[in-house]
Image (cartoon, grey):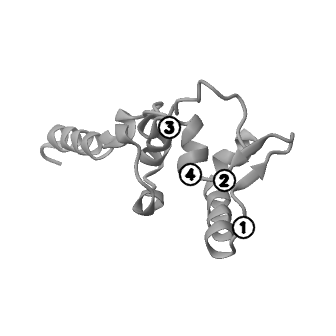
Amino acid sequence: MYDKGKIITGLIVFVGLITFPIWYGFGSAGHLPNPEKPKNAKECVEAVDYMRTSHMQLLNEWRDDIVRSGGTRAGITHDGTEYIRSLQKGCMKCHTNKAKFCDECHTYTAVKPYCWDCHIQPKEAN
């Protein structure tokens, strides 16, 4: 076989170039989200794990109850603390920076929630 060395070298370079994206990022998970925690509150309306996984279901339940069923804006946490069931007057009261809290995870997960289609975005996001 002629040019055996050139063929093997070419195959090694080819495999290296094709697999470059895999081994270049090996061992790196990339930028992980680190949402800013509220400075003036220590507890949310539900447990942190629940809020991480199910906050959109909770917000949808609030919306459906308040807007469509005429429910009350007042809510009570499991430990008896009253809160306002409102994205802007409730959630954003503690999570004051949308860019550092909401957008941090939504950008990471490539999720584009439609919350701000109806609600007014906080000023720092403009």
Task: Tell me how far mark 4 sits from mark 1, CA to CA.
Answer: 15 Å
Which residue is most to the bottom?
68
The residue beneath circle 1 is 71
The residue positioned 46% from the left and 55% from the top of the image is 111
- The reply to whether discs 3 and 2 touch (Cβ–Cβ < 8 Å) is no
Q: Quadrant of the C terminus?
A: top left
The residue positioned 86% from the left and 42% from the top of the image is 80
The crowding category of the residue bearing disc 1, from other C-alpha atoms within 10 Å (few below 14, some 14 to 19, many at least 20), is few
The crowding category of the residue bearing disc 2, from other C-alpha atoms within 10 Å (few below 14, some 14 to 19, many at least 20), is many
Q: Position of residue 50 (x, y in %)?
A: 72, 48
Q: Which mark is first along the chain, 1 or 3?
A: 1
Q: Position of residue 82 (x, y in %)?
A: 77, 43
Q: Position of residue 79 (x, y in %)?
A: 86, 39
The residue beneath circle 2 is 85
Which residue is most to the right?
79
**Amino acid type of the residue that numbered disc 2 sits on in the rendered structure:** Arg
Task: Tell me how far mark 2 sits from mark 1, CA to CA.
Answer: 10 Å
Tell me the SS state at disc 3: helix
Q: Which mark is residue 101?
A: 3
Q: Is residue 59 above or below residue 40?
A: below
Q: Which mark is first along the chain, 1 or 4?
A: 1
The residue positioned 66% from the left and 53% from the top of the image is 85
Q: Is residue 110 above or below residue 19?
A: below
Task: Tell me how far mark 2 sits from mark 4, CA to CA.
Answer: 7 Å
- The reply to whether discs 2 and 1 touch (Cβ–Cβ < 8 Å) is yes
- The reply to whether discs 4 and 1 touch (Cβ–Cβ < 8 Å) is no
Residue 112 placement: quadrant: bottom left
**Amino acid type of the residue that numbered disc 1 sits on in the rendered structure:** Gly
Q: Which mark is residue 87?
A: 4
